[in-house]
Amino acid sequence: IRSEARTISGAINGSRKTGKVITKAVAAQAESPASAASKPGHELLLFEALREGLEEEMDRDPRVCVFGEDVGHYGGSYKVTKGLAEKYGDLRVLDTPIAENSFTGMAVGAAMTGLRPIVEGMNMGFLLLAFNQISDNCGMLHYTSGGQFTIPTVIRGPGGVGRQLGAEHSQRLESYFQSIPGIQMVACSTPYNAKGLMKAAIRSENPVVLFEHVLLYNLKERIPDEEYVLSLEEAEMVRPGEHVTILTYSRMRYHVMQAAKTLVNKGYDPEVIDIRSLKPFDLYTIGNSIKKTHRVLIVEECMRTGGIGASLTAAINENFHDYLDAQIVCLSSQDVPTPYAGTLEEWTVVQPPQIVAAVEQLCK
Amino acid sequence: MVFRRFESARAGEAEEAVTYSTSDDDDEIYDAENKAIDFPGGRVAFTPQIKFISESPDKRIPCYRVLDDDGYPIAGSTYEQVDKETAVKMYKSMVTLQIMDTIFYEAQRQGRISFYLTSMGEEAINIATAAALSFDDIILPQYREPGILLWRGFTLQEFANQCFGTKDDYGKGRQMPIHYGSKQHNFFTISSPIATQLPQAAGVAYSLKMDNKEACVVAFTGDGGTSEGDFHAGMNFAAVMEAPVLFICRNNGWAISTPVSEQFRSDGVVVKGQAYGIRSIRVDGNDTLAVYSAIRAAREMVIREQKPVLVEALTYRVGHHSTSDDSTKYRPLDEIEHWKTARSPLARFRKWVQRNGWWNDEGETELRGSIRKQLLNAIQVAEKTEKPSLEDLFTDVYDNLPLNLHEQEKSLRETIKRHQKDFPSDVPV
């Protein structure tokens, strides 16, 4: 699967990011050993890509620091910070007691006095305990202080439905956070975009929530050796097509691509876009796609009520109503807590056959 | 009077905070045989007797006090000497704070501002603390500490600008009155929810640690704030991180209508320090010299030892919680009167200052008249000043204006253009 990243036309969103952007992105799933030797770049797993991005930024800027439970000596529950405490010292990669509200608040305080902290939630769901610090303080203090204090924090961690982790470890916090004014939200899905988004988030002056997914940490990909930083507000074209626009993000991207294989065999040509930027939406990329295909399918892991899909549906209806030939279809999880039983859990997450059926229905 | 700062401040010499329900005699036999056990967290001696630590000590932790109710230094008190210039500046600032509170409160009652909150009765805590700190110490206020800004040079006009939400307000009219914030004065913008600044203190302290600065963080809360989860979290973090934070709890007896007896069952807030491994002291918050000395000592400890210290300042909230409250509904008028007059921190300090020959009645009248005039003038100026313009509704949400806010601003401007007479004329567009 090849994907192309466009060059950024800075006029869209008004915020420019420093750092180079490379115009071609290769997101290869598998490659033969023969070609591997001659190809540029290096192969790594998604959690290593996150770590690489983090390490590069910590080298570049001494103000960058990390707070979280077990991030220091233990190296992080998902090994994203492995080795960093040894390299930068246990003050810069700080182990905290179990108090999400505390260490998020601590990050706000540190950011207000000039540091650039990264907060790791062991699981995104636990950050619900830090909601006040994230919404009222991270999101609002830049505004309420009249611009005097900036809060350049990154809040990151694994979320989404895993394998039988139970309801409290399977939260989709992007639903709850999307309303908070003042924050940006991005979701990574490949090692390439994980590293690029991590670097962009750290360099941003705004508070950014970076959503990782529990089941994607071991994805392998070959990424460039040269430094690159992605745009926080840009969507990724995964597979260009003509018949239908499928909008998705994070893990559901893989379910969609699996369904795409089936759809191609059946003669359909779906255009798959990984929206990546959950707040704000990249309506430029999305709009161009809709103007071409006139049909939209949204595939998300959020619950039906109040999820990213619900907001995206509203945004598309408002802005591109005239270009739609059919009603927008949104496939989401049901409004239930994620059950533990494997079979039930599988039924609560959107599966490729459902996606295929939805496209067939949409394209009738 | 020789001031030996560390004698009275040494933790080990504090009164026994903990009593046991049976005698300690039996322990000596076992201690002699050196029986102790290892557990995660360290070695502990053991006892074969069931002993519960009492929920309250026999005697409450005593309160550090220097001046008696009549402003005479108490015999045997040790305190930091204050020279004439500092003492007069402190007293004048306390008067200014009191008058500012009175006039702004009246302005709210007249409908000229929407809200106000006074610090009446807590002027000593405000000013003496400010005087004992250095300008580089970063303040994380709750909301009853404007005296610190005042001491650091925030002008009456700047206070008025914020309360009236004019375009000269540093907060650009985005926060409700008394939610001051000034980066240049090292005073963090106030956020309404209680105690949220306490976990932030550890972060600011962390920043100072990295910069190796000779300064500390000063985080305030009231008695009510100690019930919030953030109090526990903030204290615990600061202790574990060995953060140079000075926690000051203004225990003024009331959290709106909740008296301290319904807020916690511990001996006030000072005893909570030990629970977190934090050194603490209780001080008479209405005694200017005691607060000054205690904060000086505490600050020195915090910076030198790079660990947190907790100061509980006992006082009384003379005013209502805010202009949205009428405290006569839940507490007796004579109690309020008593604390307003007989226990006034200003009156007490004034007696000491005047007895030193550093102040007199003429100075008092002149000062009060002058401040009053300045304030009324500041209010007039603020009332005539333009409000922040429409674009300030959308700026500073992010560093740059994103597309959706651009659109929303455009949409709003179009609406205003179409219905011009329905929008206020004094808001610049």
Image (tube, helix red, strand yellow):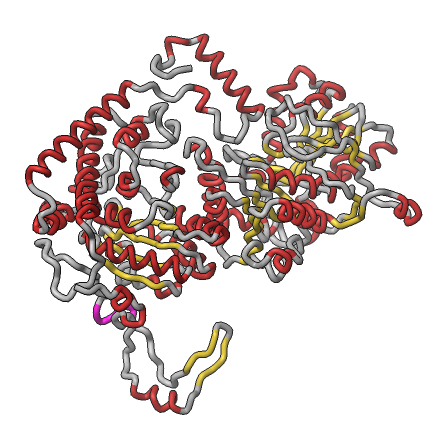
Residue B300 highlighted magenta (yes or no): no
| Range of residues picked out in magenta | B55-59
Q: Position of residue A260 (x, y in %)?
A: 80, 35
Quadrant that contains the C terminus of chain A: top right
User: Which residue is found at the position 46% from the left and 78% from the top?
Assistant: B43
Q: Position of residue B94 (x, y in %)?
A: 19, 42
Task: Give the image quarter of residue A311.
Answer: top right
Q: Is residue A348 left or right of residue B199?
A: right
Q: Is residue A339 above or below residue B382?
A: below
Toward the right, the furthest residue is: A34
Q: Position of residue B237 (x, y in %)?
A: 45, 57
Q: Is residue A64 above or below residue A319?
A: below
User: Which residue is found at the position 28% from the left and 81% from the top?
Assistant: B22
Q: Is residue A324 above or below residue A235?
A: above
Q: Please indicate, yes or no, whether residue A76 appears anywhere in the rendered image.
A: no
Q: Position of residue A145 (x, y in %)?
A: 41, 34
State whether the magenta stretch is mostly helix, strand or loop.
loop
Q: Nearer the viewer, residue B204 or B264?
A: B204
Q: Nearer the viewer, residue B183 or A194?
A: B183
Q: Is residue A69 left or right of residue A343?
A: left
User: Which residue is found at the position 48% from the left and 72% from the top?
Assistant: B41
